[in-house]
Amino acid sequence: MRVSILRFGLIVCTIFWVSCGKDESDEIPTKWEGREIDFQKDFTTQKEGNETLILHRKSTEPFEGKIERNGTAYSTIQNFEEGRLNGKSIKTSKDGSWVEANYKDGKLNGDLIFFSKEGKKRSLLKYKNGVLIK
């Protein structure tokens, strides 16, 4: 009986170790928030042709998810897929004005809108695959 209990305990410990063996700190986050200085510590860039990819330093894998950075002059909210900007990006200045841009595969794609601190549209530009549409 005692051997069976020990054997059962060993099996449970082995299953627990295998299933939980990966340290959570090794996982790459899908959402990152912090100061600009901490962003520089956690991320790096890599040139790939004409593109710049955002990589997580721990894994050197392209980042997937949302990054919210707070700097001294502005704050940004950006979405990434495979290390490239993708989706809506917002950059807010300390004076309260902001810019909203849309990206697809790392290139401006859609509206780029400048807002005043009061929330009024100041200007609008349209892009398609990184090219300004006139």
Image (cartoon, rainbow, N blue to C red):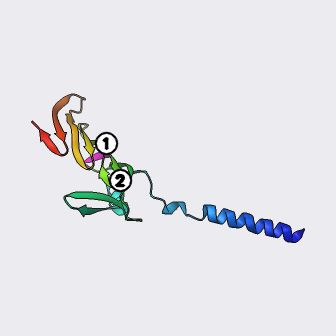
Please give left or right for residue 125 compared with residue 88 in the image. left
Give the residues in magenta: 73-77
Residue at 30 percent across and 52 percent down: it is: 84
Dominant secondary-structure state across the stretch colored magenta:
strand
Residue 103 tag number: none
Q: Is residue 93 visible?
A: no
Binning the other alpha carbons within 10 Å of mark 1 as few (below 14), some (14 to 19) or many (20 upward) gives: some
> Is residue 81 shown left or right of residue 126?
right
Q: Is residue 29 left or right of residue 112?
A: right
Looking at the rendered image, the quarter that the C terminus falls into is top left
- Give the residue at x 43% y 51%: 30
Residue 61's place in the image compared with 86, above or below, is below
- Element assignment for label 2: strand
At label 2, the amino acid type is Arg
**Secondary structure found at label 1:** strand
The residue beneath circle 1 is 87
